[in-house]
């Protein structure tokens, strides 16, 4: 009899809905398993049964919220108390309302299993703005479909099973019982759905958001396993990105940290030097031999670093190419979302070229992609670059191969485009600011056909051959530049936009994922070559350092330090990592969730971040400093106060 009761329940509308929702839970959990397996090296070394249990608990919370969002129409239609709707056509309609949204959710989760490798987090709503001007996504998805065919097969199997196993209710036999059960089910579903979507039944609590995933994990990067992509996208639709906290009074905030810099240089001997900033795509510090006991893929950069000012502790402020330009050229770090994609991108803003323009500098920005690619040209224009050289300008130069040199996905191959850059710089009057953003060392990790036998994949890292190719391209660029009269009177900066694939465990940590080289090179030796381990350096320090080195009287807003001129104890770095602020100062890194410090590490001795010192080290001063940085940042973003107005 018990089996009959179960069968009878399954044939009811509420029973069918329960079965179908359980199937959706299973589908999302299978996507999570696939996500974990594809990114095994990031998560597995730190996994334990206790952590797995915590993450499973959190996963059910976030899956419940997402599944209630995307199945709301299906549930309402199924439980609507109207007996005349219980016909084949209506049941077919509800089936489509169930299968299509859940299939899209499964697809988003599986795509993120791959995309996570390049962003370090779940996709949010800004992805639609980030790639809004790109026309290469179909080709990239096609390549990834072939490379990860098993994910495509998993998607097909799950969608077919959802279609085949979808439960339809039987015809109601008792109309009184039907109406009572349907009405009661809807009345029960409404409050339960609110609780499920909010993530809590406790009165007065805020609905869960992405940052709540941190309570179920030990490392910020692990939140991506707990979360699901539909939730991350839905919960970021129309949300205010920069929310100003009230950690302290404005007076206390300014006393603790003030991003307004006023340079009053005593040394003017470097005035008139040219500036060349080379932002190298995906050049993680892991790939550079001089930082890893000689093991790397960059013989030229290694040789240049030996003649340069370099740093043991140097970090990116973000994980995407879009994050790099504001950080490097305007001293604006990435908090919450890429600056390009927020309303604050319309704020008044300045950068290295606009600061130096009053002193006779002309400027140019170079990127071999389509001229609207990634919003680079818009930002370059906003911060004062006089000229922009992209794919359009490259095609117009008869000396080069035009579109035949396009890599098929992103941009002109690095070698010809860097030679084109050297030619254009040679035509500029001095002094100048020139910035080039390379592209080849990027997914899908292709290099020109003529080099495929020369540079091969090493250590299982597909990007390794791209790095060797880009290193060769940089060597050729410097060879061309060294023959020009402007070369000796120039300061070069080499910096990565972000990290990429990793093999060594120290580069897979929450901090290692931001570890990039920052190299200052002057051919005339005006910057003494040395490897400094007494400072902490971030991308937002580059513009302040250059302005200080050049010796001009400049007043500006910048969330960074002049590394050459400041007290080493005052240097610091900050990253935004999956809803967590990471702040490095002295020997320690703190992780701050916006309300409290959740972890403390001695990152200099504990390179794997395996020992959380929370409670055993007093980091209250660091916490207050970080709070002042955050409050300054948010206030200035929301009040359009990123420049000094006379």
Image: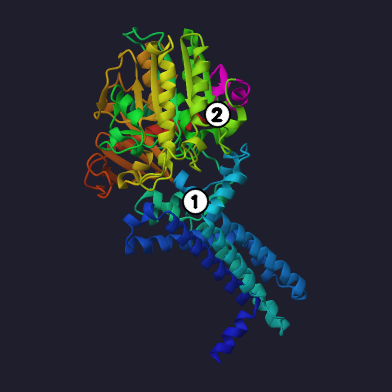
Q: Is residue 538 left or right of residue 244?
A: left
Label 1: which secondary element: helix
Q: What segment is highlighted magenta in the picture?
A: 378-398
Residue 477 against residue 55 in the figure, above or below:
above
Q: Which mark is residue 368?
A: 2
Q: Is residue 514 visible?
A: yes
Check if residue 324 falls in the magenta segment.
no
In depth, the one of 340 and 241 nearer the eye is: 340
Percent across and percent down for residue 48 are: 32, 61
Q: How many marks?
A: 2
Percent across and percent down for residue 422 are: 48, 19
Residue, disc 1: 114
Q: Is residue 85 left or right of residue 141?
A: right
Residue 190 against residue 478 in the figure, above or below:
below
Percent across and percent down for residue 434 are: 48, 19
In the picture, residue 310 is in which quadrant?
top left
Label 2: which secondary element: loop
Q: Is residue 644 visible?
A: no
Q: What residue is at 35 percent from the left and 11 percent from the top?
A: 264
Q: Which mark is residue 495?
A: none
Earlier in the chain: of badge 1 and badge 2, it is: 1
Observer-side mark, 1 or 2, equals: 2
Check if residue 394 falls in the magenta segment.
yes
> For mark 2, does the 10 Å Cα neighbourhood hold few (<14), some (14 to 19), or many (20 or more) residues?
many
In the picture, residue 302 is in which quadrant?
top left
Image quarter hosting the N terminus:
bottom right
């Amino acid at each position: 009899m018990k089996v009959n009761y179960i069968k009878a329940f399954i044939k009811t509308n509420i029973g069918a809905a329960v079965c179908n929702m359980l199937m959706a839970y299973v589908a999302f959990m299978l996507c999570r398993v696939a996500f974990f397996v594809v990114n095994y090296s990031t998560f597995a070394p730190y996994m334990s049964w206790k952590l797995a249990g915590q993450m499973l608990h959190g996963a059910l919370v976030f899956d419940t919220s997402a599944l209630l969002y995307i199945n709301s129409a299906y549930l309402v239609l199924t439980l609507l108390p109207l007996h005349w709707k219980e016909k084949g056509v209506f049941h077919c309609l509800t089936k489509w309302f169930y299968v299509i949204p859940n299939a899209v959710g499964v697809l988003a989760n599986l795509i993120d299993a791959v995309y996570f490798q390049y962003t370090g987090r779940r996709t949010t709503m800004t992805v639609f703005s980030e790639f809004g001007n790109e026309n290469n996504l179909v080709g990239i998805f096609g390549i990834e479909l072939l490379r990860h065919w098993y994910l495509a097969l998993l998607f097909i199997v799950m969608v077919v099973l959802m279609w085949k196993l979808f439960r339809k209710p039987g015809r109601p036999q008792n109309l009184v019982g039907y109406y009572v059960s349907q009405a009661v089910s809807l009345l029960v579903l409404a409050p339960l759905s609110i609780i499920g979507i909010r993530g809590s039944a406790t009165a007065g609590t805020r609905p869960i958001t992405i940052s709540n995933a941190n309570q179920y994990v030990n490392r910020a990067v692990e939140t991506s396993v707990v979360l699901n992509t539909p939730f991350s996208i839905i919960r970021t639709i129309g949300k205010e990105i920069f929310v100003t906290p009230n950690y302290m009074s404005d007076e206390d905030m300014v006393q603790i940290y003030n991003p307004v810099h006023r340079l009053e240089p005593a040394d003017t001997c470097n005035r008139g030097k040219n500036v060349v900033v080379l932002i190298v795509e995906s050049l993680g510090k892991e790939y550079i031999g001089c930082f890893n006991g000689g093991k790397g893929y960059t013989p030229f950069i290694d040789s240049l670093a030996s003649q340069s000012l370099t740093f043991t502790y140097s970090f990116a402020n973000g994980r995407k190419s879009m994050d790099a330009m504001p950080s490097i050229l305007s001293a604006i770090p990435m908090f919450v979302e890429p600056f390009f994609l927020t309303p604050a991108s319309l704020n008044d803003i300045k950068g290295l070229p606009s600061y130096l323009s009053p002193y006779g500098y002309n400027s140019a920005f170079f990127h071999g992609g389509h001229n609207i690619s990634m919003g680079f040209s818009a930002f370059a224009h906003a911060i004062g670059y006089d000229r922009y050289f992209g794919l359009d300008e490259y095609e117009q130069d008869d000396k080069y191969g035009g579109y035949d040199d396009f890599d098929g996905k992103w941009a002109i191959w690095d070698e010809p485009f860097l030679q084109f850059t050297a030619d254009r710089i040679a035509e500029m009057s001095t002094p100048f600011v020139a910035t080039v953003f390379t592209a080849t060392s990027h997914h899908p990790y292709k290099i020109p056909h003529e080099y495929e036998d020369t540079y091969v994949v090493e250590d299982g890292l597909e990007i390794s051959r791209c790095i060797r190719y880009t290193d060769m391209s940089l060597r050729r660029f410097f060879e061309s530049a060294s023959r020009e009269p402007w070369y000796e009177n120039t300061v070069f900066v080499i910096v990565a936009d972000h990290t990429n694939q990793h093999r060594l465990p120290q580069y897979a940590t929450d901090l290692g994922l931001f570890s990039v080289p920052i190299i200052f090179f002057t051919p005339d030796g005006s910057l003494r070559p040395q490897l400094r381990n007494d400072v902490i350096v971030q991308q937002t320090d580059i513009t302040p350092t250059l302005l200080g080195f050049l010796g001009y009287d400049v007043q500006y807003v910048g969330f960074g330090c002049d590394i050459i001129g400041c007290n080493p104890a005052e240097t610091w770095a900050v990253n935004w990592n999956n809803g967590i602020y990471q702040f490095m100062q002295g020997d320690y890194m703190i992780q701050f969730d916006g309300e409290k410090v959740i972890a403390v590490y001695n990152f200099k001795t504990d390179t794997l971040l395996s020992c959380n010192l929370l409670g055993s080290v007093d980091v209250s001063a660091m916490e207050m400093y970080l709070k002042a940085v955050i409050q300054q940042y948010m206030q200035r973003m929301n009040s359009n106060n990123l420049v000094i107005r006379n």
